[in-house]
Amino acid sequence: MSIFSSILQKIGIGKPATDVKAAEATADKAKADAAVSAAMAKAAEEARARVAAAQAKPVAPAPAAPVSASVAPSTASISPASAAAPMNVAPASVAAPATPAPLRPAAIPVVDVVTRLEGLASSRPELNWKVSIVDLLKLLDIDSGFESRKELATELGCPADLMSDSARMNTWLHKTVLQKIAENGGNIPANLLK
């Protein structure tokens, strides 16, 4: 797990891997349902086409059978026009399955990061997480050593010229971590993002 992902999880923004797997399974099911729906719609359309083709073919009139003397005239009187008329068969009513609604991205819940961090800081008042990346990492029980901070800076795309100066890197890193937390649903006050 990346260092920034650890930060998000510690402040209550990151999602556990099981949530990610569940979301992937839901997306896979939606894709499978869409494929089944498409196949059913295609089969229904083919059935309609076959019915329409069958209705379009003219039906040849059946040869007239001799009328037997024992048959009453009222039952034997079939008009030639009705005998030759094609049968009107209503097409089978095959309803096309409903198309599944497109997946919408889940709304990002807003987390009051300041309240959470202030709560953690109440037992460690010596840590000034609002201005120091080292103190912020310590407050979250994440390794705050230089190598760890350098790895986090690389992960977040710190410019190369800042990587050689630890003070400038730390300043950039603190600001960037708070901005990234805000982008991921953390409620960070504007004065901390300057």
Image (cartoon, grey):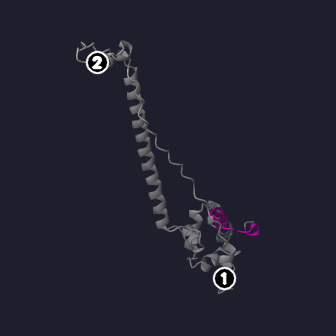
Quadrant for residue 189, please give it.
bottom right
Quadrant for residue 86, please give it.
top left
Camera sees residue 58: no
- The residue drawn where x is 65% and y is 86% is 124
Q: Nearer the viewer, residue 99 or 106?
A: 99
Label 1 belongs to which residue?
A: 121
**Label at residue 71:** none
Q: From the image, give the main secondary structure of the stretch colored magenta.
A: helix
Question: In the image as oriented, which residue stretches furthest toward the right?
Answer: 191
- The residue drawn where x is 65% and y is 77% is 116
Q: Nearer the viewer, residue 190 or 90?
A: 90
- The residue drawn where x is 46% and y is 62% is 22
Would you say 119 lies left or right of 142 here?
right
Bounds of the magenta span? 176-192
* Amino acid type, label 1: Ala
Sequence-first tag of 2 and 1: 2
Q: CA distance from mark 2 to mark 1?
A: 106 Å
Q: Nearer the viewer, residue 74 or 62?
A: 74
Q: Residues within 10 Å of mark 2 (few under 14, many from 20)?
A: few
* Amino acid type, label 2: Ala
Give above or below for 192 relative to 128.
Answer: above
Q: Quadrant of the C terminus?
A: bottom right
Q: Position of residue 63 (x, y in %)?
A: 27, 13
Q: Position of residue 104 (x, y in %)?
A: 57, 53
Q: Nearer the viewer, residue 27 or 1?
A: 27
Label 2 belongs to which residue?
A: 72
Classify mark 1: helix, strand or loop: helix
Q: Position of residue 34 (x, y in %)?
A: 45, 46
**Membership of 184 in magenta stretch:** yes
Q: Position of residue 145 (x, y in %)?
A: 57, 76
Give above or below for 119 relative to 103.
Answer: below
